[in-house]
Amino acid sequence: MNNNIISAAVISVASLIAAPAIAGDAVKGEAIFKKCAACHQVGPDAQNKVGPALTGVVGAKVASAEGYKYGKSIVALGETGATWTEEELSEWLIDPKKYLRAKLDDKKAKSKMSFKLKKEDERKDVIAYLATFSEPAAEGDAATEESTSTD
Ligand code: HEC
């Protein structure tokens, strides 16, 4: 029975180590989200604005915000079954138009989102912030907070 305790401890330590390696800083990300807030809302009461509501977007199917009128290209990508992992979101934020062109292998693909977030740190942090509104990632975020509270 001691083994159970030990393996539980090993698992939780492993998840503490794994989380910060991929996740950015959600608190910094909240400040960075101000750049996105010109067009996007996030949270339980978020509405579609210029861009779709981003609540739960981490892990969601591409172009799946209810009631939002997406551009043709991102709809086509969504129809392939593509989902927004943290890695894909980061690629998207570098340059949404280029992202759609590469993914769809279509030089004429367009994005209604013209905004680009070039700094890698800012992308990681804003994605960590968005992840706090997605169910499974919310747990990972609690682990991140615990493990970063020592610095
Ligand atoms: C100038 C307005 C504008 C800004 C600023 C902006 N976006 Fe967007 N965003 C859009 C629009 C418009 C779309 C819809 C794209 C389409 O239909 O082609 C979109 C789409 C998205 C999507 C795809 C959502 C889905 O449902 O598939 C994500 C993710 C996203 N934006 C994240 C961000 C983040 C994070 C920021 C800030 C770093 C940001 N956006 C800044 C306008 C904006």
Image (cartoon, rainbow, N blue to C red):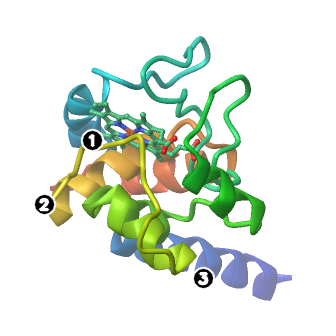
Relative height, residue 2 to residue 63 (above, below): below
Instruction: Name the residue beneath numbered marker 3.
Output: 10
Q: Could one spot residue 23 in this view of the protein?
A: no
Residue drawn where x is 26% and y is 56% of the image: 123
Q: Is residue 58 left or right of residue 146?
A: right
Residue 72 lies, in percent from the top left, at 60, 48
Which numbered disc flags the more N-terminal residue, 1 or 3? 3
The Cα atoms of the two marked residues, 1 and 2, are separated by 12 Å
Q: Is 44 or 92 nearer to us in this picture? A: 92
Res. 94 image quadrant: bottom left
Q: Crowdedness of circle 3 by 10 Å Cα count: few (<14), some, many (20+)? A: few
> Distance of mark 1 from mark 3, alpha carbons?
29 Å
Quarter that holds the C terminus: bottom left
Give me the residue at 76% from left, 60% from top.
79
The residue pinned by badge 1 equals: 29
Query: Where's residue 95, x and y in %?
Result: 28, 60
Q: Which mark is residue 119?
A: 2
Outermost front residue: 108
Cβ of mark 3 under 8 Å from ligand 1: the answer is: no
Q: Amino acid at mark 3?
A: Val
Instruction: Name the one closer to the observer, 7 or 45.
Output: 45
How many residues crowd mark 1 within 10 Å: few (<14), some (14–19), many (20+)? many
The quadrant in which the N terminus is found is bottom right
Please name the residue shown 80% across and 81% down the image: 4
Kind of element beneath mark 1: helix
Q: Is residue 13 above or below residue 26?
A: below
Residue 74 — which label?
none
- Of mark 1 and mark 2, the one earlier in the sequence is 1
Q: Kindly identify the residue that appears in the image at 17 percent across and 60 percent down.
A: 121
Which quarter of the rendered image does ligand 1 occupy? top left
